[in-house]
Image (spheres, rainbow, N blue to C red):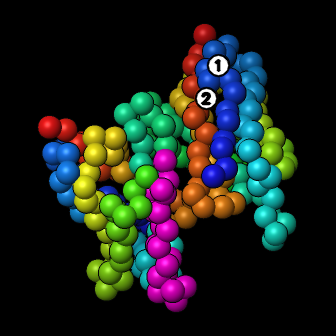
Amino acid sequence: DIVMTQTPLSLSVTPGQSASMSCKSSQSLLQSDGKTYLYWYLQKPGQPPQILIYEVSNRFSGVPDRFSGSGSGTDFTLNISRVEAEDVGVYYCLQTKQLPRTFGQGTKVDIK
Amino acid sequence: EVQLVESGGGLVKPGGSLRLSCAASGFTITNAWVSWVRQFPGKGLEWVARIKSKTSGETTDYTASVKDRFTISRDDSKNTVYLQMNSLKIEDTAVYYCLGTWLDPWGQGTLVTVSS
């Protein structure tokens, strides 16, 4: 199985400042079709997860442009510029390169 | 609005069974590959199972911890996917979600509690 490791496990951010979190996979997520199947989700308190980023760096429709994803191979980063109060929650990465699909353990973001 | 709605959760004793349903509205699941994902009380997420469309062979896949205990199936005439869960264990306690694609909005899920 591909193991997804997220760091840090928690992050406290001042509104207006930026935040960055990492997701590392135990194997390359680059698929033979040239795509890299790495997703980022945000789970706000009391809600189910919602998609933010797909295929490493593509923002899903309606996701603010202060969210950006980057990386390749086994190392991926989610950046949030100008953090807002509504960004609190747990951020998860997910790989869908191979079965079983696997999630990272999550990075909890709160506001200072 | 495209939506998958989960139902069928509840409280069951260890060793018991439950059948979860995932009903589609606003679209037909005929060509959809549908997955079940669960979220444990400690908030970790785990992919559980997937079923491909009929045209893709209706192949099923499972995570190791549920193989031989859970069965995913589909009834396209009812626009519904099922998860039959047998020999339930305490560690199966979770909120269960179904998804058509990883870009789909997640529903509210259905809570399965396995406890004596």
Say which residue label 1 marks. A11
Which residues fall within the magenta stretch?
A: B46-64
Q: Are marks 2 and 1 in contact (CB under 8 Å)?
A: yes
The answer to whether residue A65 of the structure is visible from this angle is no
As shown in the figure, which amino acid type bears the numbered disc 2?
A: Thr
Q: Is residue A38 left or right of residue B95?
A: right
Say which residue label 2 marks. A107
- Counting from the top left corner in percent of width and height, residue B47 is at 50, 53
Q: Give the SS element for disc 1.
A: strand
At 53% from the left edge and 46% from the top edge, which residue is drawn? A50
Viewer-closest of B89 and A84: B89
Q: Is residue A70 above or below residue B47?
A: above
Q: Rounded to the nearest whole Å, what is the CA distance between mark 2 and mark 1?
A: 7 Å
Q: Residues within 10 Å of mark 2 (few under 14, many from 20)?
A: many
Q: What residue occupies the far bottom of the structure in this picture?
A: B55
The answer to whether residue A74 of the structure is visible from this angle is yes
